[in-house]
Image: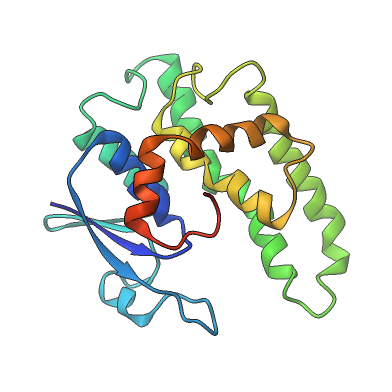
Amino acid sequence: MLTVHHLNNSRSQRILWLLEELGLDYEIVSHQRDASTNLAPPALLAVHPLGKSPVLTDGALTIIESGAIIDYIVRRHGGGRLAPEPGTDAHEHYLQWLHYAEGSAMLPLMLKMYTGRLPDGGADLQPRITSELDNHLGYMNGALQGSEWFVDDSFSAADVQLSFVPQVARLLYTLEPFPNLAAFLDRIHARPAYRRALERGGEYAFGS
């Protein structure tokens, strides 16, 4: 049985969404952030030494990192769904987007969040952070020009992985200059599987 160690208001919500899109059976072990620190609870340390979410267990196997979890679910349990055929150019583009989400796009957003907690808001760093945000969000927005989805205009697990980027950007920055990304969020938020995942996962501040 697939088990997701799910933390409220976190990246693990998209793992629930993927499982709902694939119609797979799974269990949720819910973890709540500390109300004062917003950190994950110590209970997650018993699941994995990093104490982070998401964590997926499948029998004796434990997997961390959203991209790796999504890739595993699609390859092992997807039955050929939500990913292009391996060996095709589309599959290489799919893998690129799957890694890009956390490898590149989330970094300026994390810097925006953490510098915002400094007394001066990290004023000296803000011009560079803003430049990087515009660069990455502009790149994603351009990739959606004339398309609804990121890979061959067909919904895939890459869209699930990428969804967290504009969700966080909408809260921490803005999506007004990036209408294709805003429309992308509207499409994913309207998907029945996305709505089912919200019902199962509970509190999620980043997208509804």
**Residue 68 is at least partly visible in this image:** no
Q: Is residue 44 left or right of residue 13?
A: left
Find residue 63 and report its image quarter: bottom left
**Nearer to me, 41 or 94:** 41
Question: Could you say where residue 14 lies in the image, as x and y percent from the top left?
Answer: 41, 48
Find residue 172 and report its image quarter: bottom right
**Nearer to me, 38 or 23:** 23
User: Disc count in the image?
Assistant: 0
**Residue 166 is at least partly visible in this image:** yes
Colour mode of the rendering: rainbow
Q: Is residue 111 left or right of residue 155?
A: right
- The answer to whether 86 is drawn above or below residue 114 in the figure is above
Identify which residue is drawn at 81% across, 70% down: 122
Identify which residue is drawn at 43% across, 25% down: 155
**Nearer to me, 203 or 67:** 203
- The answer to whether 191 is drawn above or below residue 198 in the figure is above
Q: Is residue 74 left or right of residue 152?
A: left
**Nearer to me, 5 or 106:** 5
Question: Could you say where residue 186 lies in the image, as x and y percent from the top left?
Answer: 57, 36
Q: Is residue 61 left or right of residue 172?
A: left
Question: Could you say where residue 35 lies in the image, as x and y percent from the top left?
Answer: 50, 82
Identify which residue is drawn at 40% across, 52% down: 198
Identify which residue is drawn at 35% across, 48% down: 197
Question: Could you say where residue 45 lies in the image, as x and y percent from the top left?
Answer: 32, 76
